Image (spheres, rainbow, N blue to C red):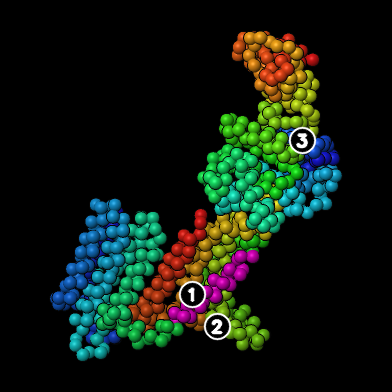
Amino acid sequence: MIRFEGVSHQYGTLEALRGVSFEVPAGALCVLLGESGSGKSTLLRTVNRLIEPTAGRVLLDGRDVAGIDPQALRRGIGYVIQSVGLFPHRSVAGNVATVPRLLGWDRARVEPRVNALLEMVGLDPGTYRDRRPATLSGGQAQRVGLARALAADPPVLLMDEPFSALDPGTRRGLQTALRRIHAETGKTILLVTHDLEEALVLADRIAVMAEGRLVAEGPPAEVLGPGAPEAVRRMVRTGALVLHRLAALPAAGAAENGPAPGSPGLPAGATLEDALLLMLAHGTDSVALEGAPPRHLTMTAILRASAP
Amino acid sequence: MTALVPLALAAALLPPLLGWISVAPNRLVSPRAAALPGSLPVLAAAGLYYLSLLGMLLSAWRPRLSWLPEAAAILAILSLAATVGLGTAAALPAGSTVARAAPAAGAWLSLLVLSLALAAAAVIRGGAPALPLLVGLLGLAVLGAAGGLDSLSLVREAAGRAAELRDALAGHVALSLAALLLALILAVPFSALALGRPRLEAAFLTAASSIQVIPSIALFGLLIAPLAALASAFPALRELGLGGIGPAPAILGIAAYLVLPLARGILSGLRVAPADLVEAARGQGLSPAGVLWGLRVPLGAGVMLGALRLAAVQAVGLATLAALVGGGGLGTLVFQGIGQLATDLILLGVLPVLALSLAVDAGLALLARLVPA
């Protein structure tokens, strides 16, 4: 659990953070959303003390991080950055083993851990273990970066625009992998992005930052609701916010009991946006939810949910 | 390799035009160019010389034989030396011990032109020029050791001063090494401290570069007075060999010049690791020492070795001036030779300095190649 209490930071005369207070519950995937210069990266870096707040404090499981030795603190927190930052003179396995080695794990423990992590991020250990970072694609490199952050099994993961430099297809692949890993491991993840769509794909909770302040915080559907802050509205085309809101709502929540013969099938776990797109693609006004008991979803239900 | 064509032509024409060998009845009389004796070994050596020049010319039309220009130039240098060595042996009056023989202007200039061609060929191929030049010098040394150059006055001079030459060479190596070590002791900790402290870095580099504008002879001279005063104030220091005259001012002076190239090289080496990589390393929990030794040093090793190479070659060159303040080294022979107008003696000092520089340069270049980029 991460708790920010009135965190402020000044670079010279520039106020990068102005009294930010909120809490990331244990096991949540919280996305820090904001435009460039909103202070989201600065806030993230106060957690592992790469930046020290000039006022306020950051609590990790109730302990003020200012009282923890920075190196010990960082070895207990996974850290992933946009430029990946793999050590070019070490192999993939050597990179992943960075923190376990710093913690003094023996070889017999490090080797299987590295292999398990590479498999977890979707890289075959036999193929990739001994490769140099320069021979990897951007997406593969960031998978290794993710494995490195997870190596010593830290309870908290900090990710600073981890997928922003990747092409859209690769980015979606890594987002899926991260969601799966989050579900499997139950880590508390704080992820910075300026991409609203990415926030919707990943987040349990969204914290929106603007000009060093926290302007909204909560579950995605709430943050993108009718009262969405200006900072969020600016991120999308006028009027398109409602579509993003549908993407934050599960289709199952608006479904009715009973079959819908002849309607296209919608996979379980899909969102209302998926349902709407499926209706548009097939020219129908209802879709059938896959699975038992038979349920279906109508256009009217979507309209009700989109403007409550 | 068309750049080598004019050089090969010059090397072909210079000896017949300006003379291969020169002979003097004794040491005091200026030597005069003499005709090349027409004996069979001399003609064979000269023939080999022109064949190797032909090889250099040929390389202009056969660019795929990348080893040819360098091999031909080395062979040309060696066959030129053999022609001159055999020629002077035949030209000297039999039984005379005072008569002197030396290469004439044509042979000297050709040697220069061929060295230039060799270095150029190495650079064009993309290699370091030091290694082939060193091979050429080693070939000359082998030729000399085999007796092929015994009749040259330079070799006679060397034979007469063998002990002196050995001492001067050992002294030269010791001076260069001591100065390099002293400069490293200053530059390494300061560079590590200055990293991330821009004001300290500016002050340090300004101080180190202001020394570069003082002429080296003047700096050695400037050090005499304070060091002499120090030695007379603390006799214990004098016992250690410190004084106004001798190796101490020379080593200090040379080291002062080496601090700037070393510090610059070390600092840029430490900055090879990009800022975001260092940030990622800190974020993983690496200590400042861990970032330095695990990241900055291995990534900057190539750049830092390059600076060490530059400084080491500079140290060998500067150590020649140590003789001016009584510091010994090969400069002793050079300045004695200048005082006596004895060209052979000057060469006796200069050629080992040259060989030493090339050896240091080639050695450190090889070492740098072993470091993974």
Q: Which mark is residue A28?
A: 3
Tell me the residue at 36%/81% (across/down). Answer: B345
Tell me the residue at 64%/16% (across/down). Answer: A265
Does the residue at mark 3 contact the one at mark 2 (Cβ under 8 Å)?
no
> Above or below — where is B162 with respect to A264?
below
Which type of secondary structure does the marked residue at label 1 adopt? helix
Residue B60: horizontal and vertical position, in percent?
26, 54
Identify the residue position indicated by label 1 in the image: B319
Crowd band around label 1 with a 10 angstrom C-alpha radius: few (<14), some (14–19), many (20+): many
- Between the C-alphas of marks 1 and 3, the distance is 68 Å
Q: Does the magenta portion include B362? A: no
Q: Amino acid at mark 2?
A: Ile
Kindly report the secondary structure that dominates the magenta region of the rendered protein.
Answer: helix
Observer-nearest of B2 and B140: B140
Q: Amino acid at mark 1?
A: Ala
Residue B251: horizontal and vertical position, in percent?
55, 76
Observer-nearest of B310 and A39: A39
Chain under callout 1: B
Chain under callout 3: A
Residue B114 found in image quarter: bottom left
**Front: mark 1 or 3:** 3
**Front: mark 3 or 2:** 3
* Magenta span of residues: B168-189
